[in-house]
Amino acid sequence: MESLGSRLKYLREKSNISQKDFAKKIGVSNTVLSRYESGDRKPDYDILQLIADYFEVSTDYLLGRTNTTEPTPQDNEDAEFQAFINDPELQVWYKDLPKSDEEELRKLRTIWEMIKTEHKK
């Protein structure tokens, strides 16, 4: 099974983008990207999603869980959630919350799921 690092390096080289330029695009240092590619370090969820979005592949593909590059329904839902929390009006509200990012994001995701459930009815 291919590793995240080898798939990332393959996609980056296939796209003809340098480590330095790609690192800048995803908001990490060149050293951090190099460590992702070597397998010495793993990206967090947000960076993994940025990588998947940039190369238009699924996170499952990057993680070696599938050889299919097409985004899964879960990837599409995560993209919807990211769009939701990046809404400018919501960000004004979100910035006023206490500084417990992970807990607040979990709560926002729960609210998002409730909204989606309501719309399906």
Image (cartoon, rainbow, N blue to C red):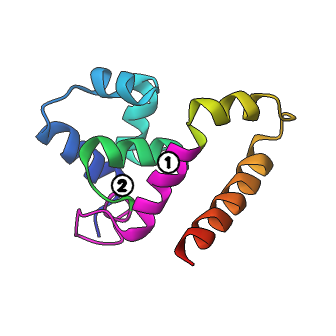
Where residue 13 sits, quadrant-wise, is top left
Q: Which residue is mark 2?
A: 4
Q: Residues within 10 Å of mark 2 (few under 14, many from 20)?
A: many
- Residue 9 versus residue 121 in the image, above or below: above
Tell me what residue is drawn at x 37 percent, y 33 percent. Answer: 34
Sooner in the amino-acid sequence: mark 2 or mark 1:
2
Secondary structure under tag 1 reads loop
**Residue at the location (27% across, 55% down)?**
57
- Give the dominant element type of the magenta stretch: helix, strand or loop: helix
Q: Are marks 2 and 1 in contact (CB under 8 Å)?
A: yes
**Is residue 114 shown above or below 28?**
below
The label shown at residue 88 is none
The residue at the point 25 percent across, 50 percent down is 56
Residue at 76%, 41% (x, y): give it: 101
Does dot 2 land on a helix, a strand or a loop?
Answer: helix
Q: What is the residue that sits farthest to the bottom in this orientation?
A: 121
Q: Which of 109/47 is in front?
A: 109
Q: Which residues are magenta?
A: 60-84
93 relative to 5 in the view: left or right: right
Q: Within 10 Å of the Cα at label 1, are there few (<14), some (14-19), or many (20+) other Cα atoms? A: some
Query: Which residue position is annotated with label 1?
Result: 42
| Residue 120 image point, x, y percent | 53, 75
